[in-house]
Amino acid sequence: MSLRAAFGLDPESVPTVRRLSALLMLTTGAEILVEGVVLSAFLARIGASALPTALALRAVVEVVASLLLERGLSRRAPGRAMLVVVVLGMLVFGGSAVALSSAAGLYTAYVAVSVIARVKTIHFGVLSLAALSGPSAARALPVVQAGGRLGGVFAGPVIAFSGPVVGAPWMLALGALLYAIALVFSLRSRVVLPDAGPVSAVEPTDASGSRLLRAIVLGAIALALGRLALVSQSGAILERAYGEADLNRVLGMYFSAANLLAFVLQAFVVGRVLGAGGLPLLNAGWAGLYLAAQSWLSFGPPSVVGALSARWVESELRNAVRTPVANLLYEAIPERRRAFARTLVIGVAVPLASLVGGLGLRFFDGHPTALGTLGFAAAVVILLTTGAQNRAWRRV
C-alpha cells in the first residue's frame, strides 16, 4: 500500500514525506538509544536525587547553545541549518562515548545528549514547515513525525538486549554511527534541500502571531516545570525498583512498546483528525491526559506501572499527539519569525524554566510534597494555556 493511499497524502508531498521521515527515524532512534543508556547509567551510578541538579545544568547549556545556533544559522536555508545540526550530533555522541567512566563525564553526557536533541527539534520543525507548508501540512506532518516513533521502536530492543552486553560507551558510539548514516542519507537524497512547499494564501500578521506565541511560551514553561517533577518522581520509583542492567532491559522494552503505540496513533489517527480540523480537540485532549498523569504521580500510590504510564503520556504520547499540533501552531506565525519563535520556546523558555524549577527543588531537597505540588500545578496551567492557544489559533 502506498503512502498516499494509506495516509491520504497529496501526491506532490509523498517524496518529501519519505525523505523527512527517514531522516527523523535515524536521528530520533539515535537520540532515544543514547538517552536510555545515559539515563540508566546516571540513575545507577549517581542516583535520582541528583537529577534536579543535572537538569538545571542542562538548562543553562541548552539556552546558550540554542541561541548561538539560531544566531549562527539564521541566514542559512532551513535544510542547510539542519545539516549543521546533524554533523554536531554525530560529533557530540561520539565524544560522549569516551566520557562515561567518571561522574563528571556522566553529567557531561547527560547534558550534551539533551542539547543535541533540543536543537534538532528546533531546526527539524522549521525544515518540515518549509517543505510541507500549506494545506498538505496537516496530513503530512504527523506521518513525518511517525518516522521518529519508528526510530524509537527499533532503538528499544537494542537498549534492552545489547546495552547490558556491550556497555554504555559502545551504545553511544552506535548513536554516533546512526547520525553519520543520517548525514550521508541527507547529502545523497538532498533531503536537507527540499523544494519550497506551497505558500499559504494568507500570511499571518505579526500581531496575531504574537498572541499565539505568548500562549505557546507560557504553556511550554509550565510543561518544563511539570516535566521536572515528573522525571524526578518517576526516576525515583525506577531507581528503587531496578539496578542498571535490569533498568536497561525495562526501559528498552518500554521504549519499543510505547513508541510502537505512538506510531500507530500518529500515522493512522492524528493526521486524519488534524486534516478534519481537529487541532483544538487533540490539543485539549492531551492536556487533560497530562493532568491525569500528574495527579496519579502526586496523589496515587507509587508503582513502576504508574511511573512508566506517566512518562508515556508526558513523552511518547506528547510526541505523537502534541508535536504535530505544536508544529501546526507555528504555521500561524510569520515564516520569517519561525526559527526565532521555536528557539525562544524550545531553546530558551523551556530550559530556563527547568533551571529555575531545578534550583527550587534543590532548595526543597526534592521533597515528594514539593514535587507533587509542582507537577499538579503545572498540569493545571497547561490545561488553561491550551485553551488560550486554541482560541488564538482559531482567530488566525
Image: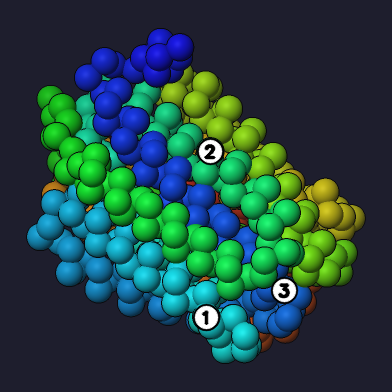
Q: Which residue carries the number 3 mark?
A: 43
The answer to whether residue 194 is visible is yes
Looking at the image, tell me whether mark 1 or mark 3 is earlier in sequence order: 3
Q: Which residue carries the number 2 mark?
A: 150
Q: Which residue carries the number 1 mark?
A: 98
Give the x, y percent position of residue 289. Answer: 66, 40
Mark 2 and mark 1: span between their CA atoms? 28 Å
The label nearer to you, 2 versus 1, is 1
Say which of 144 and 304 sits in front: 144
Mark 1 and mark 3: span between their CA atoms? 19 Å
Looking at the image, tell me whether mark 2 or mark 3 is earlier in sequence order: 3
Residue 18 found in image quarter: top left
Residue 178 found in image quarter: bottom left
Say which of 256 and 394 sits in front: 256
| Residue type marked 3 | Leu
Q: Is residue 145 above or below residue 244?
A: above
Say which of 46 and 92 sits in front: 92
The kind of secondary structure element at disc 3 is helix
Picture residue at 59% right of the left edge, 81% below the top: 100
The kind of secondary structure element at disc 1 is loop
Picture residue at 58% right of the left edge, 27% below the top: 264
Image check: 129 left or right of 249?
Answer: left
